[in-house]
Structures are given as structure tokens and as C-alpha cells.
């Protein structure tokens, strides 16, 4: 684990206010061109890409954030978490920086449910994953025929608490990537 400073900026406002705050912050730490969102709505959850200030799904349609009750927008440089509170919402921006509180960082990844939909053509910029347990979902990942599974890359932060113990503080999502070979316990690698 390496030690880093973690900055947290909190704010209130609607989804568009939060998006603007992310664009200002991310623009300062490496750009928003690769920003990905996970959006939770009553009828579905979906991934989207930030394009020209709007979140667009795999069909290129603008996602109606007025239906969202929560979303997370992230890239290598920052993460925005927004949650609805009545007619408005609250958000927090997370990014590493010299002015932030000291934390220890550990990189990790989470395997997404589902395997690649082989009927989908390569290099569309989106990859369809499906499984019998959860159905299908499209993820914004450029892929070729070799990609079967996808991981959500993240980093976990640990800090020293007032009582002197070190413990988990938060995580920050970084992006999506093709999964390497998956091995079960006891399986030969």
C-alpha cells in the first residue's frame, strides 16, 4: 500500500449541478473524456459515458437523470457520488491530492456478473454482458473477440482513526478493464 492524500468535496444540488462540479474537478486532474457512470433508477441500473456534459447509454441516448436516485461517475482522476434527497441531492467528489487527509491506498478490482454476448460485434465501444442470474447489461468498454469477462477497477483507502486503529475509510472507482483468467481455489493456474 502507498500513502496518498484523499480530498473530499461535498455539495448539494441536482444531478446537473453534480455533473458540472465533476467536470471542473476532473478537468483539473486529467480530463473527463474517459468518465464512466453507474446510474441507479427505479426501473433499471445502467452504465453510461460522459459525452459533452451529458451521460449517454450504449444506444447513444441521453440518460434521464431526473429518474435517478443515485449515480457514481468516475475516471482515473476522480469520482463523483450523487444521491437524491427529495427534489434535490447531495454529492461528494473524491480525488487524490497533496492537500487531502493522509490515507493508505490499495488497488483492487471487482468481477462484473456475466460473460460477453458473442452476438455483439467487436469495437462498438460497448460490450454486452449477460448471465442467467441477472440478465444483460452493456458496459462502455472497447473490446475485441478475446474479451469474455470485465472487471471494475477500484482503489480502497485506509486511515488511522482517533483510537489509533487503522481501518477501511472508503473506495474510489477508477474504470473498467477486460478480466484476466479466472481461477477458483484449488484450480491449477
Image (cartoon, rainbow, N blue to C red):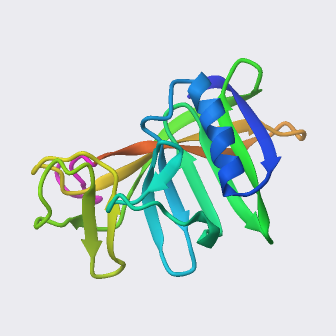
Q: In the displayed structure, does residue 11 sit left or right of residue 52?
A: right
50 vs 29, nearest the viewer: 50
Is residue 100 in view from this perspective?
yes
| Dominant SS type (magenta) | loop
Q: Position of residue 149 (x, y in %)?
A: 25, 56
x, y percentage for residue 9?
Answer: 77, 38
Residue at x 64%, y 23% (from the top left corner)? 3
Q: Is residue 174 left or right of residue 97?
A: left
Residue 81 position within the rendered picture, expressed as x and y whole percent measured from the top left: 65, 52
Q: Which residue is the extreme one toward the top?
A: 98
Q: In front here: 67 or 186?
A: 67
102 relative position to 48: left or right: right
Picture quadrant where residue 21 is located? top right
| Residue at the (59%, 36%) spot, across then down | 78
Q: Count of labels shown?
A: 0
In the picture, measured across the screen, residue 32 lies left or right of residue 90, that is left
**Residue displayed at 14% across by 63% down:** 120
Q: In the picture shown, does residue 62 fall above or below 167?
A: below
Q: Is residue 184 magenta?
A: yes
x and y, in percent, of residue 146 in the image: 11, 49
Residue shown at the point (73%, 46%) measured from the top left: 92
Residue 49 in magenta stretch: no
Question: Toward the viewer: 11 or 147?
Answer: 11
Q: Which residues are magenta?
A: 179-189
Q: Quadrant of the N terminus?
A: top right
Q: Is residue 2 visible?
A: no
Amino acid at each position: 500500500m502507498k500513502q496518498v492524500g484523499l480530498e473530499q468535496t461535498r455539495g448539494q444540488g441536482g444531478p446537473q449541478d453534480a455533473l458540472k462540479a465533476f467536470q471542473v474537478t476532473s478537468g483539473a486532474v486529467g480530463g473527463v473524456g474517459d468518465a464512466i457512470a453507474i446510474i441507479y433508477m427505479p426501473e433499471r441500473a445502467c452504465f453510461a459515458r460522459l459525452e459533452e456534459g451529458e451521460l449517454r447509454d450504449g444506444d447513444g441516448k441521453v440518460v434521464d437523470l431526473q429518474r435517478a436516485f443515485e449515480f457514481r461517475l468516475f475516471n482515473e482522476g476522480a469520482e463523483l457520488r450523487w444521491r437524491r434527497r427529495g427534489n434535490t441531492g447531495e454529492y461528494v467528489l473524491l480525488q487524490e491530492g497533496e492537500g487531502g487527509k493522509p490515507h493508505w491506498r490499495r488497488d483492487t478490482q471487482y468481477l462484473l456478473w456475466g460473460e460477453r454476448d458473442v452476438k455483439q460485434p467487436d469495437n462498438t465501444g460497448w460490450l454486452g454482458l449477460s448471465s442467467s442470474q441477472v440478465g444483460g447489461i452493456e458496459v462502455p468498454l472497447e473490446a475485441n473477440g478475446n474479451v469474455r469477462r470485465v472487471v471494475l477497477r477500484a482503489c480502497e483507502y485506509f486511515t488511522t482513526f482517533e483510537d489509533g486503529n487503522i481501518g477501511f475509510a472508503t473506495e474510489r472507482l477508477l474504470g473498467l478493464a477486460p478480466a484476466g483468467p479466472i481461477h477458483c481455489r484449488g484450480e491449477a493456474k
